[in-house]
């Protein structure tokens, strides 16, 4: 087991998501500082599983898409600590529309 250590520079650590596929580390997904993450999974046509990791801020939404998970493959999730800005960069970053920001603040 690999544990990420607190950095010497006093930087605050973020809660991050570590994903392994068939026992091999696929990646660590680190949300923006102060944000949380979410995972959505679904079996598509009952032939394979799709997994998407999401996070974001009030200004933007971040998305990662994992490779298709076939039947009998194993996927594991673990919450770890990581430095903000480390990990796999998001596959897409979508700005939150001004109307959505206005709706969320009311």
Image (cartoon, rainbow, N blue to C red):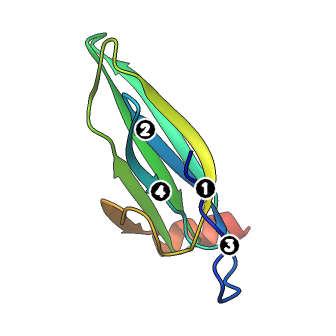
In the rendered image, residue 53, in percent from the top left (x then y), is placed at: 45, 47
Nearer the observer, disc 4 or disc 3? 3
Q: Is residue 53 above or below residue 43?
A: below
Q: Report the residue that reaches farthest toward the bottom.
A: 9
Residue found 41% across the figure and 22% down from its top: 74
Of label 2 and label 4, which has the lower sequence position?
2
Q: Quadrant of the N terminus?
A: top right
Q: Nearer the viewer, mark 2 or mark 4?
A: 2
Residue appearing at x 27%, y 13% in the figure: 45
Q: What residue is rendered at 50% in x and 32% in y?
A: 76
On the image, the x and y values in percent for residue 104 come to 66, 64
Instruction: Measure the alpha-carbon separation of dots 1 and 3.
Output: 10 Å
Which structural element holds mark 4?
strand
Residue beneath label 4, please?
A: 29
Left or right: 105, with 38 as reference point: right
Sooner in the amino-acid sequence: mark 4 or mark 3:
3
Pointer 2 and pointer 3: residues touching (CB < 8 Å)? no
Q: Quadrant of residue 48?
A: top left
Q: Which residue is mark 3?
A: 6
Disc 4 packing (10 Å; few <14; some 14–19; many ≥20): many
**Real-space Cα separation, disc 2 to disc 3, in angstroms:** 22 Å
- How far from the left and from the top, in percent, is residue 82? 58, 65
Q: CA distance from mark 4 to mark 1?
A: 15 Å
Above/below status of 38 relative to 14: above
Q: Which residue is mark 1?
A: 3
In primary-sequence order, the first of circles 4 and 1 is 1
Q: Residue 64, how many percent across, how many down?
A: 37, 52
Q: Which sits earlier in the primary sequence, circle 2 or circle 3?
A: 3
Q: Decide: marks 2, 4 in contact (CB < 8 A)?
A: no
């Amino acid at each position: 087991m690999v544990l990420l250590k607190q950095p010497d520079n006093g930087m605050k650590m973020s809660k991050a998501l570590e994903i392994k596929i068939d026992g091999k580390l696929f990646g660590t997904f680190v949300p923006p500082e102060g944000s949380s993450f979410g995972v959505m999974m679904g079996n598509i046509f009952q032939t394979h599983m799709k997994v998407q990791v999401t996070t974001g801020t009030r200004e933007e939404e971040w998305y990662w898409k994992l490779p298709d998970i076939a039947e009998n493959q194993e996927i594991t999730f673990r919450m770890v600590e990581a430095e903000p800005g480390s990990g796999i960069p998001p596959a897409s970053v979508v700005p939150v529309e001004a109307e959505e920001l206005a709706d969320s603040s009311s």
